[in-house]
Image (spheres, grey):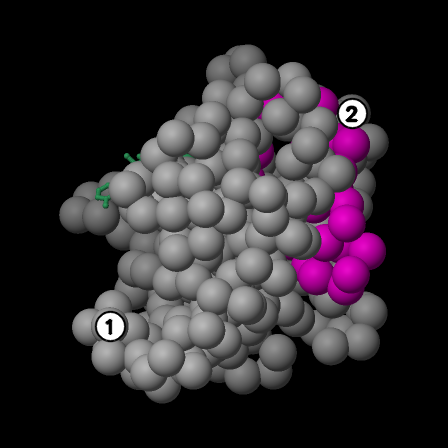
Amino acid sequence: PEPGAALLDVRKIRKTFGGLVAVNDISFAIRAGDIVGLIGPNGAGKSTTFNLVSGVLPLTSGEVELLGQRVDGRESRDIARGGLSRTFQHVKLVPDMTVLENVALGTYLRTRSGTLRAMLRLDKAEEAQARAEALRQLRRVGLAEQAHELAGNLALGPQRLVEIARALASDPSLLLLDEPAAGLRHKEKEALAEVLKQLKAEGLSLLLVEHDMDFVMKLTDRIVVMEFGRYLMDGTPAEVQASPAVRAAYLGA
Ligand code: ADP
Ligand code: MG
């Protein structure tokens, strides 16, 4: 998509768990080329919002449009093929597979049926292609040298980059990252920020949930704030930082 084109349009999405309204009629839009932050106190509904938008959880109500196509009600694999990919709050790598194999699992989304079982039936040519593609994505995140290490042997920072490479392997237009900097050392955070800036420069759009305010403020063009499942405000990092409502939400005042 051209920079500025409508990429994601989220309209009044809602999710209830029993009596709890985890996401309460949230709306926001992302244009191609944006890096948008999604912030809010613990339990605000950020991860659930990701799960709704990426099709991991069914919506209670509301609509999601990706590149002009309605995707609400579709399976996450279909949505990934449609151009939206995501990482999870907790690392989901297979620790006793290599870095390359972990990423190759993501490339497989592009091919026929997208199931692990089908992957095991890949012919040699397809397998070689998946591995070449995985290596290409590892280069984008600066991890080609670690391709043949076991994923479980990497530190947390590089593991997060492997997850990003895996998400990139389905060739998304929009990448959702759920707390990518959580638990990382300062140097690892800097490396991650550099990778994300590079991806933006390549034309990828990002939506990221992140608790490290410094990290969010430096990286994003715009920030959406949630509290108790509700939309609180959205604005530039400077506007959000200056907002008394946002301050109150974080201080619980
Ligand atoms: P955040 O990511 O902003 O910290 P979550 O989206 O994880 O918040 O959670 C929002 C609310 O929904 C919380 O109160 C949480 O306990 C609840 N919640 C999340 N997932 C489930 C689930 N699968 N079943 C029941 N309640 C859930
Ligand atoms: Mg969360």
Name the residue located 29 percent from the left edge and 64 percent from the top edge: 58
Q: Relative to 147, is 116 above or below?
A: below
Q: Give the crowd class for mark 1: few <14, some 14-19, many >=20 residues within 10 Å.
A: few
| Marks 1 & 2, CB-CB < 8 Å contact | no
Secondary structure at numbered mark 1: loop
Q: Tell me, yes or no, whether the highlighted magenta stretch contains residue 215.
A: yes
Q: Which residues are magenta?
A: 196-220
Q: What residue lies at 46% left-to-right and 73% top-to-bottom?
A: 128
Q: Is residue 177 visible?
A: no
Considering only order in the chain, which callout, 2 or 1, is on the residue closer to the N terminus? 1
Q: Secondary structure at mark 2?
A: helix
Q: Is mark 1 within 8 Å of ligand 1?
A: no
211 drawn magenta: yes
Q: Residue at x 39, y 40 (%)?
A: 151
Q: Quadrant of residue 193?
A: top right
- Residue 196 lies left or right of residue 14; in this view the side is right
Q: Going 52% across and 62% down the picture, which residue do you hit?
A: 134
Task: Tell me the quadrant of the picture where the N terminus can be found.
Answer: bottom right
Q: Which residue is mark 2?
A: 242
> In the image, is residue 150 above or below residue 199?
above
Q: Quadrant of residue 186?
A: top right
Name the spot of residue 206 as percent of width and height, x first.
65, 53
Out of 21 and 101, give the one closest to the viewer. Answer: 101
Badge 1 is on which residue?
A: 120
In this view, the mark in front (1 or 2)? 1
Q: Amino acid at mark 1?
A: Leu
In depth, the one of 172 and 147 nearer the eye is: 147
The location of residue 155, given as percent across then percent down, is: 47, 26
Where does the image place residue 77, in percent across and percent down from the top left?
Answer: 37, 72
Q: Is residue 141 left or right of residue 69?
A: right
